[in-house]
Amino acid sequence: MENLIIEKTTATPEIRFDYATGILELLGESYPEDTVVFYAPVFEWLKNFLNNNKERAITVNLEIIYFNSSSSKALMNFFDLLEAAANAGRKVVVNWIYAKGNEGALEYGEEFKEDLDALEFILVEKNV
Amino acid sequence: MKVNDFFQYREGITQNGIFLTFNGVLIHSFMVQLGEVLKMKMSLFNVDKNLEAKIFATVIEQAQNIIFYSSERQPVPAMKGVMVGVGTITVGMEEDNHYYVICGNMLPTDKVEKLNHRLTMIQNMNQDELKQYYKEQRRMTPDADSKGAGLGFIEMARKSSNAIEFDFRKLDEINSYFTIKATF
């Protein structure tokens, strides 16, 4: 399976999914022109990884500074897939990285965390 | 506009504290640039980053409403005649130094009742209720096929310091004009 690499733009995050390490990174802002189209390869990659590697652990490092409401839905769907994998016994760690003082990013991280049980959701404060 | 009418126009927008306004066909790349200008303007005045983020988020949600849902649409020649949504977004400052974002666009008159009902419900929710409703709605449409609009108004209400305000003006049986305002 190939790595997934999508370069950052003003309105879309950088995405790096590494097959060898199982580390998935999303970094930047997210308010795409068409959220479904933008995130389609992300979901496809993740589903492939989950189906073809039944045991392997996944670490997700997310540092999304701003995301719009449709991206919020996409992220929830993304976490739901990971939550189902964690429920099936896989080790899944999500690091929600936010800059110190960014109240919105912390609040939205906390809200995702509240809605997820099986996967390990860690709020990581970063000093700017 | 006549050249000798411009002063009057300037007086009007100055009195309303308007410092950024966009009117006309709105495409995604315009919205992105508008957001950039807004952020630059706010950083010039050392606006608190958390406040800036709220205003920015509101502008994006309102702009996307125009892009996806404005019923007034114009063909754009350079885009092979694709019909693009038309609307108006304004960011300004009230006399009491609070920022506001207002956005307006046409919508079909037969959609007014349903939207009015929904916005009235959102307007009357406190922050805890808005948070619960947001989370419920986010889970309601798992495949994100509504382009996110289900959440957009809740998001605006959550960011706004005061309750959101809105207005519907019926133009005729087909068209109404919809305006929504958030204050920070």
Image (cartoon, rainbow, N blue to C red):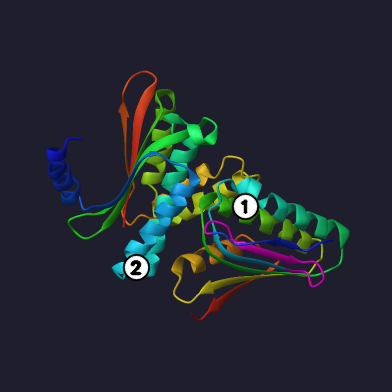
Q: Would you say residue B128 sits in the magenta stretch?
A: no
**Is residue B13 left or right of B107 when viewed as pictured?**
left
What amino acid is found at the position of numbered circle 1 in the picture?
Answer: Ala
Q: Residue A22 appears at what percent x and percent y?
A: 78, 69
**Is residue A90 left or right of B40 when viewed as pictured?**
right
Per the rendered image, the range of residues in magenta is A10-23
Asked if the residues shown at circle 1 and circle 2 are in contact, with their CB atoms under 8 angstroms apart, the answer is no
Mark 1 vs mark 2: in front:
2
Q: Residue B92 appears at what percent x and percent y?
A: 26, 53
Residue at image position (51%, 42%) is B149
Position of residue B45 relative to residue A12, above or below, is below
Please give the residue where the numbered disc 2 appears in the rendered image.
Answer: B43
Residue at image position (40%, 35%) is B86
Q: Residue B109 appears at what percent x and percent y?
A: 39, 24
Circle 1 residues within 10 Å: few <14, some 14–19, many ≥20? many
Q: From this viewpoint, is residue B43 visible?
A: yes
Q: Secondary structure at mark 1?
A: helix
Number of residue marks: 2
User: Residue under mark 2: which chain is it in?
Assistant: B
As drawn, the label of residue A74 is 1
